[in-house]
């Protein structure tokens, strides 16, 4: 299936990987705190087969298939604490407007009952968004959020503010912004520009829920290794920026956002008693919550 957009860029493969990770963990890991029954429904048969293999603990033969299997297994470990931290932050603030930046195959608008009174804007690269809309149509899942508006934006070239205004987002009312699993794929300048655009549309009472990567030699080496093994999942989506927590807090402060919490995923995973074999990625992955000062 052709998943490229007019500009030639393909739909995000890492978005599929994260979705596979959540599908692996659903009903098995951190039950009661984590659930994503919608994730598996968005996957294509070959993508589901890897999920089934990981759930069954039956790694495939051949290094390439094995690398794909290990990527999904590791991603499940990271996805659980990340999802729990973000879901809990959103439940506390669910009301009004939620903008999901770089939504990928995020399922919250289709599964998080707390969003029943919330209008959701799903912002993503056009190619990724087109792919998601096809998957949603095929899966016939219905949103639980009050509304979902798809807003295609390439953070590298498009005007996020103008796109949201055209899609009916109200800059005069508070907004919860979710930015999960996207910052590493953007340059520092793109991160700054996106923050400037979102804070320009943030009324008092707005909140940013942010997932980003802190620098980690071990996590970088692991990612380089999977690229060297020509893992087609992550090959086309290199990491471009990592942020130390204090640098991120300073950047957010420059944009009028006060960091309320900033936790690493390893500590979160340990508190949930979930697997921590992927220690380097867990240690460097972080979820921060920042409020408009
Ligand atoms: C790893 S996925 C994360 C998806 C989702 N937020 C999640 O955590 O499951 C990265 C997402 O960032 C988006 N992305 C990366 N670069 C982008 C850009 N320049 N403009 C818009 N979206 C971008 C991709 O389309 C993809 O959906």
Image (cartoon, rainbow, N blue to C red):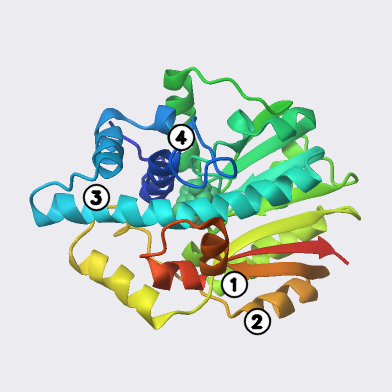
- Contact check, label 4 and label 3, Cβ < 8 Å: no
From the image, which quarter does the N terminus lie in?
top left
Observer-nearest residue: 134 or 265?
265
Instruction: Return the mark for residue 69.
Output: 3
| Mark carried by residue 189 | 1
Q: Nearer the viewer, mark 3 or mark 1?
A: 3
Residue that extends furthest to the front in the rendered view of this protein:
273
Q: Nearer the viewer, mark 1 or mark 2?
A: 2
| Residue visible at 37% across and 32% down in the picture | 43
Q: CA distance from mark 1 to mark 4?
A: 32 Å
Q: Residues within 10 Å of mark 4 (few under 14, many from 20)?
A: many
Q: Nearer the viewer, residue 126 or 218?
A: 218
Residue 18: % across, % down: 43, 48
For label 2, the residue is 247
Q: Residue at x 83, y 53 (%)?
A: 206
Left or right placement of residue 41 versus residue 72 in this view: right
Q: Earlier in the sequence, mark 1 or mark 4?
A: 4
| Cα gap from disc 1 to disc 2, whole angstroms | 14 Å
Q: Which mark is residue 39?
A: 4
Residue in the image at 35% along x and 37% along y: 3
Q: Earlier in the sequence, mark 4 or mark 2?
A: 4
Q: Nearer the viewer, mark 1 or mark 4?
A: 4
Q: How far is the residue under mark 2 from the one under mark 3?
A: 34 Å
């Amino acid at each position: 299936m052709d998943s490229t957009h007019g500009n030639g860029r393909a739909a995000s493969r890492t978005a599929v990987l994260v979705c596979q990770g959540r599908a692996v963990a659903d009903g098995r890991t951190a039950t009661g705190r984590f659930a994503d029954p919608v994730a598996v429904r968005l996957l294509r048969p070959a993508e589901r087969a890897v999920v089934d293999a990981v759930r069954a603990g039956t790694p495939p033969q051949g290094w390439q298939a094995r690398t794909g299997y290990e990527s999904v297994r590791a991603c499940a470990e990271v996805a659980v604490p990340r999802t729990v931290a973000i879901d809990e932050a959103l439940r506390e603030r669910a009301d009004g407007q939620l903008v999901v930046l770089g939504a990928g195959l995020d399922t919250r608008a289709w599964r998080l009952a707390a969003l029943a009174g919330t209008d959701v804007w799903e912002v993503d690269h056009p190619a990724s968004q087109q792919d998601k809309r096809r998957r949603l149509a095929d899966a016939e899942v219905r949103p639980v959020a009050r509304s979902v508006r798809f807003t295609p934006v390439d953070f590298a070239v498009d005007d996020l503010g103008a796109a949201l205004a055209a899609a009916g987002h109200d800059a005069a009312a508070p907004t919860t912004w979710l930015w999960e699993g996207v910052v590493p794929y953007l340059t520092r300048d793109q991160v700054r520009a996106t923050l400037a655009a979102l804070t320009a549309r943030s009324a008092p009472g707005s909140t940013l829920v942010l997932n980003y990567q802190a620098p980690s030699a071990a996590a970088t080496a692991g990612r380089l290794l999977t690229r060297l093994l020509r893992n087609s999942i992550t090959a086309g989506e290199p990491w471009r920026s990592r942020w130390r927590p204090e640098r991120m807090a300073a950047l957010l402060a420059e944009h009028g956002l006060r960091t309320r919490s900033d936790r690493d995923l390893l500590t979160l995973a340990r508190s949930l008693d979930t697997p921590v074999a992927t220690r380097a990625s867990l240690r460097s992955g972080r979820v921060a919550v920042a409020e408009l000062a």
